[in-house]
Image (cartoon, rainbow, N blue to C red):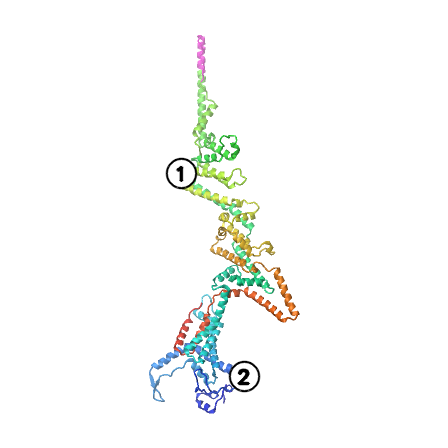
Amino acid sequence: MGGPWEEYQDVGAAPAAAANAEAGPWTQYQQPADFSDVTATSSTTAKPPKQRTTAQKLAREVGGLGLRNVVEGAADLAGIVTDPVLDVINWAGEKGPTTNSLITGKPERRWPEQQSTRASWSGLLDLLGVPKPENDRERVAGDIGRALTGTALTMGAGGLLNAGRASITTPTIGGRIGDLLTAQPGWQLASAVGGAGASGATREAGGDEGAQALAGLLGGFAPQATGALGAGSLRTLARGRNGEQMQKTIRDFATMGATPSVGQATGSRAIQGVESLLAGGPTSSGVMARFAERQAERIGDGLQATANKLSPRSSAEQAGRAIKHGVLGEGGFKETARNLQSRLYDDLDKQIDPSTRVEVSGAEQALKNLNPAIPGAPNLSPLFQNARIHGIERALKRDAWGPEAVASRPGMADQIQQTADMLKSRGAAVDQLNSAAAAAIERQNVMRTSLGQKPIEFVPYPTIGKADVDQEISKLLAEKADGKLPYEALKKLRTVVGQEIEDAGLMSDVPRSKWRALYSALSNDMRMAAEAKGPEAVRAWSRANKYTNFLMKRMDAIQHVIDKNGGPERVFESAMSGTRDGGTTLRAVMQSLPLDAQKTVTAATIKRMGLATPNGQNTSGDVFSAGTFMTNWNRLSPEAKRSLFDRYGSDFSKNMDRIARVADNIKRGSKVYANPSGSGDRVAAYSYGVALVGSLLSGRLPTAGLLAAGGVGANASARILTSPRAVAWLARSTDLPKAAALASIRQLATGSDDPGVLALQQAINSYEGVEQP
């Protein structure tokens, strides 16, 4: 009876079969081995195998040799674990006790020497008559088949370890090993083929195990090394040696929800030039234009989303209203500041009694200096003096020195009344005295007349009339005049002058500069009053005065903004004026607003920055323009940018810088992304179409083929240059695939008895438990 593979074997002579009958039931179908003429190159002079049909060759190589390769490859993989155990058993057998053989009676090992896993399975295949490789090609192919089998099994084991994983963020040790075993399957297979093929070819050429290991290592690394070299060269040519800047550009675009083209990401002028050419190509312009439109739309949406995140539905009108209400509205800056100012002066009032009379000499001198007379021109001087300041000066003198002001002091009315009453009583007494004296003299004169004597002339005492009373009262008031005012009056006077400063405009009858000089003099008079009361009063006055000065400066800085005519839009524009040279006004406005109003102003600014000009807009009016954004961005001084963007955390300011870099990249890069295709592109498309159709109709097929191929190539190039995958691939660093290298080294460590290779195998086994990046 013949075996199942007999028709595919080269049957030798009958004696040879008889001689090998004890080897197994299938040996009669095998070609006997003849090593009599083996050379250093492993060639043989044995009789060549018989000629086989194609079907026989296919059945032998796939069914027979393929089966052997699969089984032996699985045995090699299992041997990584089992062979070290068998080596221990053999070592123990060599060192252990011996027993006498029952057949020979001689000492022998307690248990027989164990074959390696692969040798055991190979022997079984031999017993079953499975074909064995007959030449160097089949032996090398067998090496490759066994390597592929081992790689497939390890990847399958890795897949089982990964099956049903509950969490990616917290992988288990088994999951990590599974990730390693299944990493980059294509590279693993390529490495297995290259390593096994190189090692087998070296063996067939007569190389020892060390040479085979080295060849296998190099062969295993060859595919990925070649791929890495090519990828690295292409990346270096496109982006330069370091991809960090390219990755930063990609992150900048991702902030806006967009992706750059290859030219934008790499910054390569050459690639950007190619993109510009493709933007004008008849078959590629559509691809480039659609990419540019999508990119602009996404960046515009990202810009609007950034603004809406701060303040939804913000606009110039809303920003203007927010500014005005934030400063002048209920609970706004002015009201809040006034309340704080009042509290600070209340603290000062606790130190100084409101009725305390204080000097106003500083204010008197300031008013005099504000309206100087022209020496020698008493009639001209009033014409050049400010009438209101002059009136204030006269009024202050009357209040500090005049009798009316003295009479208005607390208690003075009683004193005046008492003086008047006293004078009136004195006048009545004088009148009575005069009446009595007149009656007495009259009686004497009657007597003297009767005696012929000269009558006595009656001279009455001076009487006290109304004029005398008024004179005495005026004298009293003059004596009480001291050139001072009550502290309360001084404080209120300074407050009124401060309001005049806030309200003073170009058409005011008193310039703001004059009000400021008077305000400063009144403040100095208040300081003198505080110093007279002691250190606590001085400290209270200093706090109140400093805050008042701050308030006046702030209101002075923003007054022209909130008083702007023309509606809220004009208020917003006024707040943004001068931001190219600095940010004083904008900073003062932003610092005077509550947080919500600040966000509204910033959001309105962001929304306006990137809007294309009217001739480049769509019906919705939301087209983004990198050129417009950069123009508006550069109009903002660093101080203005800080006032607008540094109030919401460092991340917000960094995002705005990223947006600026994206817009600048688009503006400086390929022109197609800043300016969509125009009439020139349409002309090129028409010309290309006419040339292609003309070539076909005229029978010039080679020319038509070249035109068609050029058009397809341009279209494909445009798609590649605008592909996010291509950009991401170019941005990656070029590294050798670690999983593929691991597969190559594992292949070399499989099925070898060389001590160095076995040591390498142990290192691989320990490496497989390490997490790979």
How many other residues sit within 10 Å of disc 2, few (<14), some (14-19) or many (≥20)? few
Residue 749 is at least partly visible in this image = no
Type of the residue with mark 1: Glu
How many other residues sit within 10 Å of disc 1, few (<14), some (14-19) or many (≥20)? some
Question: Circle 2 sits in a helix, a strand or a loop, which is it?
Answer: helix
Residue 725 location, x and y as percent? Answer: 52, 66
Is residue 307 placed above or below 158 in the rendered structure? above
Is residue 393 placed above or below 15 in the rendered structure? above
Question: Circle 1 sits in a helix, a strand or a loop, which is it?
Answer: helix
Q: Nearer the viewer, residue 511 or 273?
A: 273
Q: Which residue is mark 2?
A: 55
Q: Which residue is mark 1?
A: 531
Q: Point out the residue furthest to the left here.
A: 97
| Range drawn in magenta | 438-460
Q: Earlier in the sequence, mark 2 or mark 1?
A: 2
Number of numbered labels in the structure image = 2
Quadrant housing the C terminus: bottom left
Residue 160 location, x and y as percent? Answer: 47, 73
Q: Nearer the viewer, residue 482 or 739?
A: 739
Q: Point out the residue furthest to the bottom here.
A: 15
Is residue 421 placed above or below 606 in the rendered structure? above
Residue 202 location, x and y as percent? Answer: 45, 78
Type of the residue with mark 2: Ala
Residue 64 location, x and y as percent? Answer: 49, 82
